[in-house]
Image (cartoon, grey):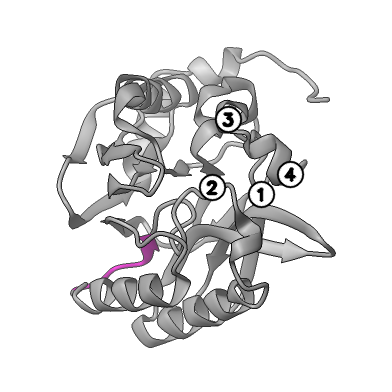
């Protein structure tokens, strides 16, 4: 069982509704990652931007992107996670894929579709949590708007790290910063947020603020620029913090409906 997990956060602008061009962009960025990295995290809808017109994207692009993720994971011997648009049985999903080096997949459909933008009218909401066991770490991947809902994020499964991939715009960036830190503190887990930068075709501006917080809510990494950022998560930090501060022992028990 690994005692450490090194992650790379790819904070990047996105080409609007252009999966092939975005795959080429991220291929180049992934190629620049050196050293021992275990997990690469990409933003929400990293092949299209946060579009409410999934019908404009070829139905085969989801399959093409998953195959691309599998090739990249195998080539770099690293896991890759990010969300994309998927069409399935005539329905659309904002679907996150966690792809392991051997090609194995974990899938999570965004639970909280963003009603302010009408995402709930276009994309089907997910219903199930997905926990990923990877190199001895228990990871809980979520998508953007999920960050605002602490019950869905609550650490009832003793996970080690939360992962949020996002297209979170500038006007509400203070909420992003605040909630990432809060989720780390209340769940006594690492909290990782990967956002995009740049401007999309709807006029929304994104300024990044990708960040990592430890179990005490201390910021380990932060950026407002286009960058590939690396940080290492440590099992001992999780264990020692929880052994000393047994706050999770007092957590509420509840059933989600």
What residue is shown with label 2? 141
- Residue drawn at the location 34% of the way across and 39% of the way down: 203
**Disc 2 to disc 1, C-alpha distance:** 7 Å
The answer to whether the residues at label 2 and label 3 have Cβ atoms under 8 Å apart is: no
Above or below residue 104? Residue 128 is above
Q: Secondary structure at mark 4?
A: loop
How would you rate the neighbour count of disc 2 (Cα within 10 Å): few for under 14, some for 14-19, many for 20 or more?
Answer: many
Residue 37 belongs to the span the image colors magenta? yes
**Disc 3 to disc 1, C-alpha distance:** 11 Å
Above or below residue 29? Residue 2 is above
- Residue bounds of the magenta highlight: 35-41
What residue is shown with label 1? 130
Along the polypeptide, which appears first: circle 2 or circle 4? 4
The answer to whether the residues at label 1 and label 4 have Cβ atoms under 8 Å apart is: no
**Disc 3 to disc 4, C-alpha distance:** 14 Å
What residue is shown with label 3? 153
Along the polypeptide, which appears first: circle 3 or circle 4? 4
- Residue drawn at the location 35% of the way across and 33% of the way down: 169
In this picture, residue 68 sits left or right of residue 77: right
């Amino acid at each position: 069982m690994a005692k450490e997990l090194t992650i790379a956060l790819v904070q990047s602008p996105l080409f609007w509704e252009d999966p092939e061009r975005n795959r080429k962009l991220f291929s180049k960025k992934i190629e620049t990652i050196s050293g021992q990295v275990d997990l690469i995290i990409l933003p929400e809808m990293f092949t299209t931007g946060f579009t409410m017109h999934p019908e404009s994207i070829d139905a085969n692009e989801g399959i093409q992107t998953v195959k691309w993720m599998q090739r990249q994971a195998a080539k770099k011997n690293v896991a890759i996670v990010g969300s994309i648009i998927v069409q399935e049985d005539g329905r659309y999903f904002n679907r996150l894929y966690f792809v392991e080096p051997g090609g194995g997949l974990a899938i999570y459909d965004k639970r909280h579709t963003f009603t302010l933008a009408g995402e709930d009218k276009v994309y089907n909401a997910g219903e199930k949590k997905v926990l990923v066991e990877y190199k001895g770490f228990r990871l809980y991947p979520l998508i953007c708007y999920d960050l605002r809902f602490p019950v869905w994020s609550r650490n009832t499964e003793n996970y080690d790290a939360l992962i949020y991939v996002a297209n979170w715009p500038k006007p509400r960036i203070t909420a992003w910063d605040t909630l990432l830190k809060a989720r780390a503190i209340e769940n006594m887990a690492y909290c990782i947020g990967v956002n995009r930068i740049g401007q999309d075709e709807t006029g929304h501006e994104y300024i990044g603020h990708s960040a990592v917080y430890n179990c005490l809510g201390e910021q380990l990494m932060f950026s407002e620029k286009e960058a590939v950022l690396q940080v290492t998560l440590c099992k001992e930090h999780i264990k020692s913090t929880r052994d000393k501060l047994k706050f999770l022992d007092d957590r509420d028990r509840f059933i989600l409906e």
